[in-house]
Image: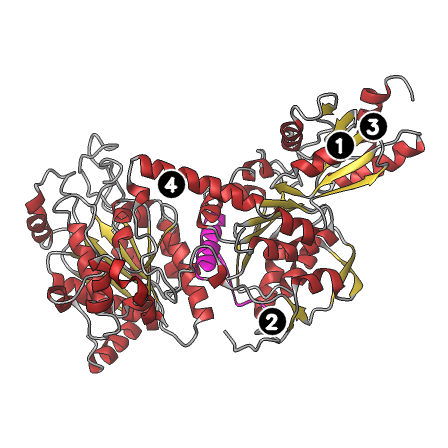
């Protein structure tokens, strides 16, 4: 690694604080795809390592991170052999003290699945940018987000970006929050494949001659595996291999600790994301459309159209899936009579999350897990409006 | 800084176990000529082990740890299996990640250590069983060879899935009856030492651990070549005496038998690897 002074990183970018990068640095307007803003975000994050593997629709983001390595912005980069290998390789990178990013989609996520609870159990703050894609057979490459349901209980933080701008900002904030010493768990930054990865939108970016401070692995709750610091005996006590009460208790408490670490991300995430839930529309409405990702865009369009019809509604966009923002959701839907959960998958995982979160708290609220589209189908605003009219208006307003 | 990590804070010396004190006071850290001869005099880097009585893996690990040229800067990546029972007892930075992904994890570690510490020698050694290396992890083992990663891969070949109760592995010899092969194994032992050569390793060796000095020499050679040239592979016969019906004292005899049979010495060194070994000999390190 090239020598750096306190003011610049190895590629000569000026080091700035996370707050300056996200909130204070002047921004200029660009017209970019989701894949392109991943490159722009990583360029500003002083990333040590990335490992890639091709799968649609995330391949372009992975190529562009490779270009950053060729340009000297990323420390080390290579193509792995498959997603299971890649997720193990980035784990090794992080264990050795690196800030690491990788990307995948759909079948790649499921192929790599064994690694994700290992990541959280190892307390490595890897960032996975997941560009959601269908996982069903027959083969599909369409933007269905069923894969997210498999990620929910892996012990990783999960954020969900609505659009290209959010993907840029969340990618930067993701490193900052995941690397907090009292958090220090992996973060999965999700966006809908194609709808965000390939969609070109206006986006406001800070200059590219500034970057986040380097990751300091010596502040981690577990030491990096670099033979530079104690303990010399990383696994001194072989509790893992004992079948006794101590072993059970240790494993149980470690799992609780991982979930507690995810929960401890809340104040940081609230600050850097400027809220785990964003509510727009008529704030005093009796109808709420609770969404995440690009379903939020469609819900906002439906909200506008419903308004023209004289029906008040609001859109409650969930930005953090893990930790799930129970208090913020409750505050956003308190007193609401009808909650609709439009989503891009067949099982309704977000509806289940919403029901669990509101159970016994909003007893008079009717939760409707529709519209639900799957297989990569688009979700026209009309589908949301139709559900609202059928379930709420019941014959006219 | 690496050597300092084994130094105990003076305030804590009076409460530290003797084996930890011995690690600071009498282990062979920082000695480029450390080796198998230290077993008689120096504190070993493994304290006890939790393997079966008489298990040759325990002996193999003692020889290997004695042979590491620079243990204070060596990371060991292991995998699930009998070998994972030993690693909590080793005085080095070790990693257990998943079953079979050891060469992928080691790749990530080595790449980043080279990035973070370009002016330091940091050896990364994979040590896993035959199931992890040759079956479930074969892809990752071979791919690390193809990519020319600077890693030493050591396979403890006991020719069986021992830790899960004695099931056939790809490394089991033809005809051997084990669980999941109740009529005997129907295909030949996978010739991993040969695959290592065709996959790009600069050093490949197959031997038993019946002769400590020979094992130590092979390990040193493999690590030096991995450090400076490219990937290296060592396959050691460490029989599961339990699963082949031998008593605790019979492991050595079994290995001596196999010195003449399946584990007759195999040694391949690439041209570049040999040049490196010649250089190390001149430096008095081999």
Label 2 CA crowd tier, 10 Å (few <14, some 14–19, many 20+): few
The residue wearing badge 2 is: A71
The residue wearing badge 3 is: A286
Figure label count: 4
Which is more N-terminal, label 1 or label 3?
3
Marks 3/1 same chain: yes
Q: Is residue A373 left or right of residue B151?
A: right
Mark 4 and mark 3 residues within 8 Å of each other at the beta carbon = no
The residue wearing badge 1 is: A333
Q: Residue furthest top?
A: A395
The residue wearing badge 4 is: A250
State which region is magenta.
Answer: A71-96
Where B98 falls versus A379 (above or below)? Answer: below
Marks 2/4 same chain: yes
Indicate which label's residue lies in the foreground, 4 or 3: 4
Label 1 element class:
helix
**Residue drawn at (60%, 57%) of the image:** A176
Label 4 element class:
helix
Q: Is residue B38 left or right of residue A16?
A: left
Label 3 element class:
loop
């Amino acid at each position: 690694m090239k020598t750096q002074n306190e003011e610049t990183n190895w590629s000569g970018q000026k080091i700035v604080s996370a707050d300056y990068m996200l909130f204070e640095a002047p921004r200029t307007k660009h017209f970019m795809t989701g894949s392109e803003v991943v490159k722009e975000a990583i360029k500003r994050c002083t990333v040590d390592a990335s490992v890639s593997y091709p799968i649609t629709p995330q391949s372009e983001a992975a190529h562009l991170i490779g270009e950053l390595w060729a340009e000297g912005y990323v420390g080390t980069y290579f193509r792995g052999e498959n997603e299971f290998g890649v997720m193990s390789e980035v784990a090794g990178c992080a264990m050795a003290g690196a800030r690491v990013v990788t990307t995948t989609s759909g079948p790649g996520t499921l192929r790599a699945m064994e690694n994700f609870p290992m990541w959280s159990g190892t307390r490595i703050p890897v960032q996975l940018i997941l560009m959601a894609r269908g996982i069903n057979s027959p083969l599909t490459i369409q933007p269905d987000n069923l894969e997210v349901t498999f990620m929910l209980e892996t012990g990783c933080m999960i954020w969900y970006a609505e659009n290209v701008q959010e993907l840029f900002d969340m990618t930067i904030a993701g490193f900052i929050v995941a690397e907090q010493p009292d958090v220090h768990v992996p973060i999965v930054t999700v966006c809908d494949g194609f709808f965000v990865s390939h969609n070109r939108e206006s986006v406001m970016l800070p200059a590219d001659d500034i970057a986040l401070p380097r990751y300091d692995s010596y502040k981690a709750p577990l030491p990096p595996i670099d033979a530079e610091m104690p303990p010399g005996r990383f696994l001194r006590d072989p509790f893992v291999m004992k079948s006794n009460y101590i072993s059970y208790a240790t494993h149980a408490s470690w799992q609780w600790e991982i979930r507690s670490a995810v929960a401890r991300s809340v104040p940081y995430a609230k600050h850097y994301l400027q809220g785990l839930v964003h509510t727009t529309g008529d704030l005093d409405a009796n109808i709420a459309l609770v969404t995440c990702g690009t379903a939020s865009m469609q819900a906002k369009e439906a909200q506008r159209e419903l308004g023209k019809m004289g029906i008040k509604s609001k859109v409650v966009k969930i930005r953090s899936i893990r930790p799930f923002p129970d208090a913020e959701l409750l505050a956003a839907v308190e007193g609401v009579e009808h909650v609709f959960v439009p989503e891009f998958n067949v099982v309704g995982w977000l509806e289940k999350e919403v029901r669990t979160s509101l159970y016994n708290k909003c007893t008079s609220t009717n939760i409707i897990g529709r519209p639900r589209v799957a297989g990569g189908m688009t979700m026209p605003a009309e589908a949301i409006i139709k559900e609202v009219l059928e379930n709420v208006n019941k014959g006219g307003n | 800084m690496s050597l300092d990590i084994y130094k105990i804070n003076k305030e804590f010396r009076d409460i530290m176990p003797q084996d930890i004190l011995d690690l600071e006071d009498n282990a062979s850290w920082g000695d480029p000529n450390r080796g198998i001869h230290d077993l008689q005099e120096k504190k070993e880097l493994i304290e006890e082990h939790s393997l079966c009585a008489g298990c040759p893996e325990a002996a193999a690990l003692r020889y290997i740890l004695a042979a590491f040229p620079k243990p204070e800067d060596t990371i060991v990546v292991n995998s699930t299996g009998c070998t994972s029972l030993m690693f909590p007892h080793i005085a080095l930075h070790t990693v257990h990640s998943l079953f079979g992904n050891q060469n992928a994890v080691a790749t990530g570690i080595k790449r980043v250590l080279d990035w973070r510490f370009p002016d330091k020698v940091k050896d990364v050694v994979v040590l896993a069983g035959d199931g992890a290396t040759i079956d479930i992890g074969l892809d990752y083992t071979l791919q690390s060879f193809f990519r020319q990663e600077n890693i030493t891969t050591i396979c403890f070949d006991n020719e069986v899935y021992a830790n899960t109760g004695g099931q056939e592995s790809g490394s089991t010899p033809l005809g051997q009856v084990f669980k999941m092969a109740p009529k005997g194994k129907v295909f030949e032992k996978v010739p991993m030492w040969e695959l290592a050569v065709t996959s790009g390793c600069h050093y490949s060796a197959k031997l038993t651990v019946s002769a400590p000095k020979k094992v130590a020499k092979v390990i040193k050679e493999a690590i030096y070549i991995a450090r400076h040239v490219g990937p290296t592979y060592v396959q050691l016969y460490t029989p599961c005496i339990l699963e082949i019906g031998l008593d605790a004292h019979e492991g050595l005899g079994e290995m001596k038998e196999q010195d003449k049979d399946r584990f007759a010495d195999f040694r391949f060194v690439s041209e570049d690897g040999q040049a490196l070994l010649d250089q190390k000999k001149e430096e008095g390190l081999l």
